[in-house]
Image: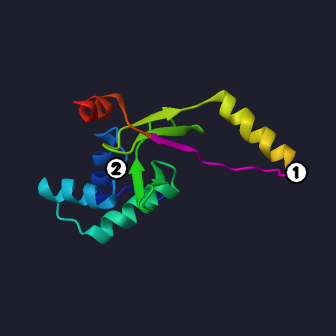
Amino acid sequence: MERMTKQRQAVFDNLSEHRDFRSAQKVFEDLTSRGHKIGLATVYRNLQALAEDHQIDVLRSSEGEALYRKCDTHSHHHHLVCRNCGRAEDLGVEELEKWVSTVAQTHGYTQIEHSIELFGLCADCTRKANN
């Protein structure tokens, strides 16, 4: 585990304040608007280090952009993500884990690792779209 520098702590605190997955650019904009002296490359480096230390989760958007979030749990889980606002819910779905195991066994695979992200519109964004 790497040392929690002042800049890394600022990045971590920013993610802790939000429930959505956030891009490095968004974290950078939030921090600089609050007066933090931090470069975009430093934000990227610290997000990567926090992800490698399993302190935050990372996923790829449908456009391939890395998005980051501090989750409520450190145990294995999945995400349900609003593709409009980025809001996310942590999912630990037993049936999904059984399905992954069955698929792996059917094809003769072992030592499976997986990450499953479900994308859709949250209730708030659905309401706004229908108005």
- Most common secondary structure along the magenta stretch: loop
Horizontally, residue 36 falls left or right of residue 108, namely: left
Labels in figure, total: 2
Residue 86 sits in which quadrant?
Answer: top left
Residue at numbered disc 2: 12
Residue 4: x and y in percent read 37, 55
Image vertical order of residue 15 relative to residue 88, above or below: below
Residue 113: x and y in percent read 69, 50
Q: Is residue 118 magenta?
A: yes
Q: Are marks 2 and 1 in contact (CB under 8 Å)?
A: no
Query: What amino acid does circle 1 point to?
Result: Gly
Nearest to the observer: residue 41 or residue 3: 41
Residue visible at 66% across and 28% down in the picture: 94
Horizontally, residue 108 falls left or right of residue 58, namely: right
Residue 82: x and y in percent read 38, 40
Query: What amino acid does circle 2 point to?
Result: Phe
Magenta-drawn segment = 108-119
Residue at numbered disc 1: 108
